């Protein structure tokens, strides 16, 4: 959530079309290779992962390919993790218009990820089961990496220069003040476990339910203030490529980002994943499910191993290129030339109005509106829709925000605690 405020004050984002133009002119248009490795140790058997290398934006067109890597760390059962693994990708993709060009598609992804996460949560809720899951969901299209996450399964990026950065935010009540405030404001109670009514033990939890996370998919029994709205970050790597390490908290409770990256530099993705799990086990023992995906994004003209050297981290924290106000062409190409990572998008707000924007219905003339979350079309003649007609009516009170169907509108209000009494 801290990122939310920071990003609001920033100048407008660099248009993706501009960046792609640079890419083409600098001969960077060829897609990098993606190599991955996976390793896991089960304690409770609630970790799941997803690897899909052969997705196509345009059906049967390999030139439009992208890959997906995800980790789902379940709790209180496995059904939420399995359901999310099976449905989330389709729910995200269905929120992007079929006709979108590549740059439109990439620009639409952050919004589509929010819609897909919320839709998956609503669908899971209808099953009436009580388990929950973290989700760290990574889409790689060329040099552009988009990460959406709820919970505490992290994704880190290790660039060629040896600089390690976090692409996710930990949604843990213990560590995230803004999330504590949001949960409390929406009607949840945050506190530690009471033993014998006196001693408070363990991390901060949300009551009822006692969950340590502030965001997840599922957890129907805990409360709507545990929201499925993901933190989303989109970056573009330099043509030096980079390595992603995506892992459940079994790794991160044992190793810092730097430790995990350092442990496996110079090794193939396959060996790297095994070694990171081994390192975590060595330092902490097997206390939790431990799953690790290592993904190398490698320039196609040199199929070399990922970075072997670690340079001094004197610019840690400023690895992401600043977004210039105007005339970004010069600054952008300069950043690329020194191997910096360009930050295209970052937003972590839990408010759907801020995440989905104003929805432009695909078919304004026919009076059909499409829900920005579940993509279901609603006829404007329906009574229950008329209240949300603001953007297209000058006489009624302007309705700020995306168009939502009654089901998704109800979900939104429940998450924000407006129905709490
Ligand atoms: Zn809907």
Image (spheres, grey):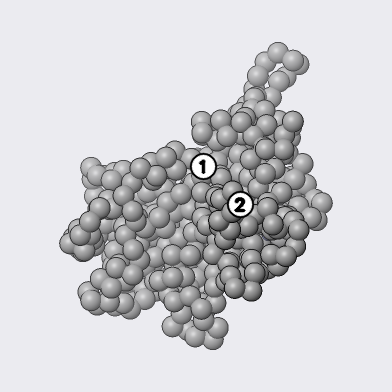
Q: Nearer the viewer, mark 1 or mark 2?
A: 2
Q: How many marks?
A: 2
Quarter of the rendered image showing ligand 1: bottom right
Q: Is 70 drawn above or below residue 52 in the view shown?
A: above
Please say if 218 is above or below 86: above
Q: Secondary structure at mark 1?
A: loop
Residue 350 visible at all: yes
Instruction: Look at 35% across and 42% down and name the residue there.
Output: 9
Quadrant, the C terminus:
top right
Image coordinates for residue 187, horizontal then vertical, percent: 67, 31
Q: Residue at x 56, y 44 (%)?
A: 350
| Disc assigned to residue 90 | none
The picture places residue 401, in percent across and down from the top left corner, at: 55, 52
Q: 388 or 220, which is in the foreground?
A: 388
Does the rendering let one see residue 137?
no
Q: Residue 318 in the image: x percent, y percent? A: 28, 45
Q: Residues within 10 Å of mark 1 (few under 14, many from 20)?
A: many
Please give left or right for residue 354 compared with residue 263 in the image: right
Taking depth in this image into account, of 260 and 189 the one nearest to the observer is 189
Q: Residue furthest bottom?
A: 60
What whole-number distance in Å separates the C-alpha atoms at marks 1 and 2?
Answer: 41 Å
Q: Which residue is mark 1?
A: 170
């Amino acid at each position: 959530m801290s990122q939310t405020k920071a990003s609001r004050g920033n100048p407008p984002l660099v248009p993706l079309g501009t960046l792609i133009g640079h890419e083409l002119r600098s001969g960077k248009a060829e897609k990098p290779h993606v190599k991955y490795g996976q390793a896991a140790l089960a304690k409770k058997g609630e970790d799941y992962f997803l690897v899909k290398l052969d997705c196509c934006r345009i059906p049967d067109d390999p030139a439009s390919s992208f890959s997906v890597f995800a980790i789902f760390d379940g709790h209180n059962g496995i059904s939420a993790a399995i359901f999310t693994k099976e449905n989330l990708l389709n729910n995200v993709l269905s929120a992007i218009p079929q006709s979108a060009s590549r740059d439109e598609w990439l620009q639409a992804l952050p919004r589509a990820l929010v819609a897909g996460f919320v839709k998956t949560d609503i669908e899971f809720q209808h099953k009436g089961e009580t388990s929950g899951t973290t989700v760290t969901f990574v889409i790689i299209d060329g040099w552009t990496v988009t990460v959406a996450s709820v919970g505490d399964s992290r994704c880190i990026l290790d660039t060629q220069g040896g600089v390690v950065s976090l692409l996710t935010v930990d949604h843990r009540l213990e560590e995230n003040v803004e999330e504590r405030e949001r949960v409390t404001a929406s009607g949840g109670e945050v506190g530690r476990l009471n033993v014998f009514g006196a001693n408070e033990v363990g991390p901060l939890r949300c009551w009822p339910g006692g969950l340590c996370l502030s965001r997840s998919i599922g957890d129907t029994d805990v409360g709507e203030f545990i929201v499925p709205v993901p933190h989303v970050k989109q970056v573009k790597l330099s043509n030096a490529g980079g390595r992603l390490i995506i892992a459940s908290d079994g790794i991160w409770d044992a190793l810092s980002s730097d430790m995990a990256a350092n442990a496996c530099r110079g090794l193939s993705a396959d060996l790297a994943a095994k070694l990171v799990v081994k390192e975590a086990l060595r330092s902490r023992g097997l206390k939790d499910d431990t799953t690790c995906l290592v993904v190398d994004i490698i320039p196609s003209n040199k199929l070399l191993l990922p970075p072997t050297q670690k340079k001094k981290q004197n610019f840690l924290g400023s690895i992401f290129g600043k977004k210039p106000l105007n005339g970004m062409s010069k600054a952008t190409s300069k950043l690329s030339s020194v191997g910096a990572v360009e930050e295209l998008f970052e937003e972590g707000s839990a408010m759907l109005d801020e995440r989905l924007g104003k929805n432009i219905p695909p078919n304004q003339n026919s009076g059909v509106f499409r829900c920005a979350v579940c993509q279901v079309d609603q006829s404007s003649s329906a009574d229950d829709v008329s209240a949300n007609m603001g953007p297209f009516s000058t006489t009624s009170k302007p309705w700020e925000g995306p168009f939502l169907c009654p089901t998704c509108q109800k979900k939104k209000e429940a998450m924000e605690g407006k129905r709490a009494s």
